[in-house]
Image: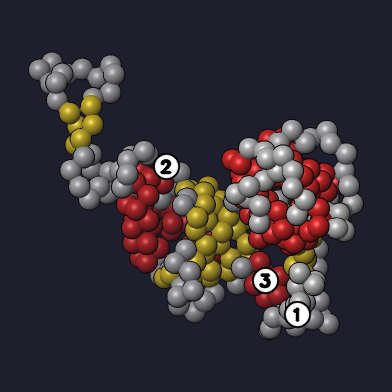
């Protein structure tokens, strides 16, 4: 969607639907106890039957999704074949991505966008803003001349805090040049769960906005079931690299010398002799 914003001049908006799960209708008989302090003479022992879903009920996410599809359909938005969470109108002048109750909307014309948001707000109360700076954990920096920076600085800061690496010394590379040989050295085993949690978080980061750490994360993930102290040292080295490079991000730009109509990629045929 950011590609459409940068290359085709689509206008970006973000919105948040308030108390989303409360809009879903229950599809089964579910009863709850009366809340503390609610007393009606002769009805103290009665229970309540839910007409709408509540946060915490098992059906709530599914009922909310059904309600959302119904509402968006009434406004002319249909799920795309590529992604059920990505919607578009018939002439594809509006595109909408929804994650639970957070929406990212882009469109060709601002009056059409605002009309859609106002109609949606009449059904589901929401808050919206133009050119958001944060969305689903991403930091979005809108620059002039059709350039956008997309990063996850907040996630990196949280990871450094979680693994007590906030005050660590930064390094300039994600790993040592002989990383693969170092990881093969037998060492003292360390706790598996923290290592796996760190690898999972770093892999999420690598897959979304930091491809520069992909090689290191992939190498470290091979030892997720039997990590040693040597692997943990390499993991800390990667955290130190992230500390010094947290500002790195993906850049989407519209340059006259580049075409946005196709994809260009490069590959290393032998995976760097691995």
- Residue found at x 72% / y 39%: 188
Q: Position of residue 242 (x, y in %)?
A: 79, 48
Q: Is residue 61 above or below residue 210?
A: above
Rendering coords of residue 80 (x, y %): 46, 73
Query: Which element is circle 3 on?
Result: helix
Pinpoint residue 166: horizontal percent, then vertical percent: 79, 35
Which quadrant of the figure has residue 146? bottom right
Residue 148 in view of the camera: no
Q: Quickly name the residue at label 2.
A: 19
Is residue 195 visible in the rendered image? The answer is: yes
Q: Residues within 10 Å of mark 1 (few under 14, many from 20)?
A: few
Q: Is residue 267 left or right of residue 96?
A: right
- In the rendered structure, the answer to whether residue 232 lies left or right of residue 191 reads right
Q: Is residue 108 left or right of residue 183?
A: left
Relative to the observer, which residue lies in front, 264 or 197? 197
In whole angstroms, how far apart are the C-alphas of marks 1 and 3?
28 Å
In the rendered view of the protein, which quadrant contains the N terminus? Answer: bottom right
In this figure, which residue is indicated by the disc labeled 1? 269
Which is closer to the viewer, label 2 or label 1? 1
Residue linked to disc 3: 3
Q: Bin the neighbour count of mark 3 within 10 Å (Cα to Cα): few under 14, some 14-19, many 20 and up.
A: some
Which of the two discs, 1 and 3, labels the residue nearer the N terminus?
3
């Amino acid at each position: 969607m950011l590609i459409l914003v940068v290359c085709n001049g689509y206008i970006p908006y973000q919105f948040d639907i308030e108390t989303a799960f409360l809009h879903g209708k229950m599809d089964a008989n579910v009863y709850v106890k009366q809340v503390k302090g609610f007393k009606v003479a002769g009805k103290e022992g009665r229970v309540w039957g839910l007409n709408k879903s509540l946060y915490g009920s098992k059906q709530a996410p599914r009922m909310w999704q059904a309600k959302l599809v119904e509402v968006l359909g009434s406004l002319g938005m249909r799920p795309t074949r590529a992604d059920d969470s990505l919607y578009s109108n018939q002439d594809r002048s509006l595109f909408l991505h929804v994650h639970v109750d957070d929406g990212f909307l882009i469109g060709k014309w601002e009056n059409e966008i605002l009309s859609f948001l106002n109609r949606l707000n009449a059904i589901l109360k929401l808050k919206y803003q133009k050119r958001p700076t944060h969305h689903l954990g991403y930091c979005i920096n809108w620059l002039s001349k059709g350039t956008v920076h997309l990063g996850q600085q907040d996630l990196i800061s949280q990871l450094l805090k979680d693994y007590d690496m906030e005050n660590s010394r930064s390094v300039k590379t994600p790993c040592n040049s002989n990383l693969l040989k170092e990881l093969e050295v037998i060492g003292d085993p360390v706790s598996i769960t923290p290592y796996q949690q760190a690898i999972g978080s770093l892999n999420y980061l690598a897959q979304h906005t930091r491809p520069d750490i992909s090689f290191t994360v992939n190498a470290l993930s091979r030892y997720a079931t039997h990590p040693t102290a040597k692997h943990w040292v390499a993991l800390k080295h990667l955290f130190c690299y992230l500390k010094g490079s947290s500002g790195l991000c993906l850049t989407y730009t519209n340059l006259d010398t580049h075409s946005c109509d196709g994809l260009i990629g490069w590959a290393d045929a032998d995976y760097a002799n691995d």
